[in-house]
Image (spheres, coloured by chain):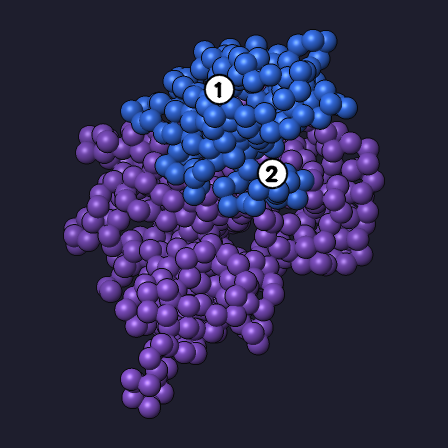
Chain colours: A blue, B purple
Amino acid sequence: MSKEFNRNEIEDLLFLEADLLDDWKLKEWLDLYTKDASYYVPSTDLPKDAKADDSLFYIADDRLRMEERVTRLMKKTAHSEYPRSKTRHLVSNVRIRSIDTDNDEAEVSAAVVTFRTKGGNTDPYIGSNYYRICRENGVLKIREKLCRLDLDGLRPHGRVSIIL
Amino acid sequence: MKDQKEYVKIDRDRNTFHVSRSAFVESDVFDQEYEKVFDKCWLYLGHESEVKKKGDFVTRTVAKRNIILTRDTKGNLNALLNTCPHRGATVCRESSGNSKNFQCFYHGWVFGCDGKLKNQPGKESYDTEFNDDGSSDLASVPRFDVYAGFCFISFDPDIIPLPEYLAGAREYLDLIASHSESGMGVVDGSQEYAIRANWKLLVENSIDGYHAVTTHASYLDYLMNTNGGLTDVALEGKSHDLGNGHAVLEYSAPWGRPIAQWVPLFGEEGKKEMQEIYGRLVELHGEDIAHRIANKNRNLLIFPNLVINDIMAVTVRTFYPSEPGYMVVNGWALAPNQETEWARKYRLYNFLEFLGPGGFATPDDVEALESCQTGYRNFKLVEWNDISKGMGLESPSYDDELQMRVFWSQWNNYMKAES
């Protein structure tokens, strides 16, 4: 693999992201992302190459909406997450898929399970995350995150009110 | 249902309307709903745009039945029961696709996409007149009809015709179908989810104008933040009883609508494009209808469980209970068959800001419905839900509860009917 990216530092970034999300440090979570970042959760019946511009996703946030998502989730009026759920993001099988040296960017995949517990129910979100990770002023940042769920639908979850 | 049990209590002198919470929790109500409501109504199967080409199919579960919606090689639509007439296996195990035939993998029987038995291994061992009566073809659903692109089925062979059943809802389906002269179609990708609550809670919630300000406070904050202040359009409008248990709220609201209420978030490029869309609607339908299509929001319930909400975008949603406190929901986005890349992108962006399990509003609805279901554990001590708001008013507002009373009155009629 290229000298610009190695798996250890990418894993550190993804594990840090998981911790921040589980600690509900969502503003700090946003800091891991570039200013042109995006965050996607496609619907579970779409083909892999589906795009949010012409297919219906569960979530298709640009940076503005990621910020608004965080702002909303930090409010008591985000009823679905107040009182807050407990979450545990597990990240595994991290692989650097390819490196784009021109843009100083790596494509990374990881197998993930996120558990959300609230009100006596624990629901697992099982899937794989695809990241585009770049280096900004020497610091690794996430430019894109896409969470592809290995589920038939959000059942019984009913929502993706947490950040996956 | 026990004869003496009343689930709906109406006092016309005091203008109160109460619904028993036992209707949301009791298993005998749940059992009877399938028999007395779902099996006696027209139910939404899918949209004709989902099976555009000959051989296209989608599979659906409707009121516990496995159905295949197909467009056969002659171009006709069919609603077939997805079970092999031979020994019962499902003959199609994919959610969608294109195929001239369905082959049951168990013993290899082959059916055309019109359901006709074409071949079976070991044919020579059968009587020469085998299937002359068609009883070994895939069975069709007893009734099937299409209105304005929306495909409906019924398991009641004697049900009234679909247009008659739809009553006043026809006008609203026509309005939605008129968004574009290219017709409307379902966008790829369906939002499939579940809610740990009784299905009738989602009926109520889908047409509830009263809850927005509190349940969706954080969404309204978001609109304020991102749109440079809301548009100066007020939340106001009316609710209407459309007959046969169908109801609609029609109202203006400050959020953006892809057809064709512009907000600053859509950008200047969008402003021009939306003016053109609006101009074309005026040419086609005149100023009044164009204004209604473009600027009015509609939350439409077609009894018992089809919701078409033409709000920040157009969503079609249907749902069934698998137990009293659990429902399975399927939601789709409906959009003009032909619109620019810009328009499609912003339509979906706008859809997701509010709608669906990852939006800024639906999760809080889900939470509210689950919270109600939890509250109903006390149903023997606190028995009645109140949906009296606006009762006795000549023209109830969008945030009154007329539409829920329309639903519950009809639900009560069906449940009381002799089967």
Quadrant of residue A32 within the rendered picture: top right
Asked whether residue B211 appears in the rendered view, the answer is: no
Query: Mark 2 or mark 1, which is nearer to you?
Result: 2
Crowd class of label 1 (few under 14; some 14 to 19; many from 20; radius 10 Å): some
In the image, B45 versus B131, the foreground residue is: B131
Question: Cα distance, mark 2 to mark 1?
Answer: 21 Å
The tally of labels here is 2
Look at the numbered disc 2 and give the secondary structure of its residue: helix
- In the displayed image of the protein, which residue is found farthest to the bottom? B128
Q: Is residue B199 above or below residue B146?
A: above
Q: Quadrant of residue B66?
A: bottom left
**Where A103 sits versus B297, above or below?**
above
| Residue drawn at x 39%, y 33% as measured from the top left | A157
Q: Position of residue B360 (x, y in %)?
A: 54, 28
Q: Is residue B138 above or below residue A161?
A: below
**Depicted A79 relative to depicted B120: above or below:** above
Q: Quadrant of the N terminus of chain A?
A: top right
Q: Residue at x 51, y 46 (%)?
A: A45
From this viewpoint, is residue A8 visible?
Answer: yes
Q: Nearer the viewer, residue B47 or B12?
A: B47
The answer for which chain carries disc 1 is: A
Q: Label 1 amino acid? A: Thr
Label drawn at residue A77: 1
How far from the left and from the top, in percent, is residue B41? 38, 61
Q: Residues within 10 Å of mark 2 (few under 14, many from 20)?
A: many
- Pick the residue in front: A110 or A85: A110
x, y percentage for residue B418? 24, 64
Residue B351 marker? 2
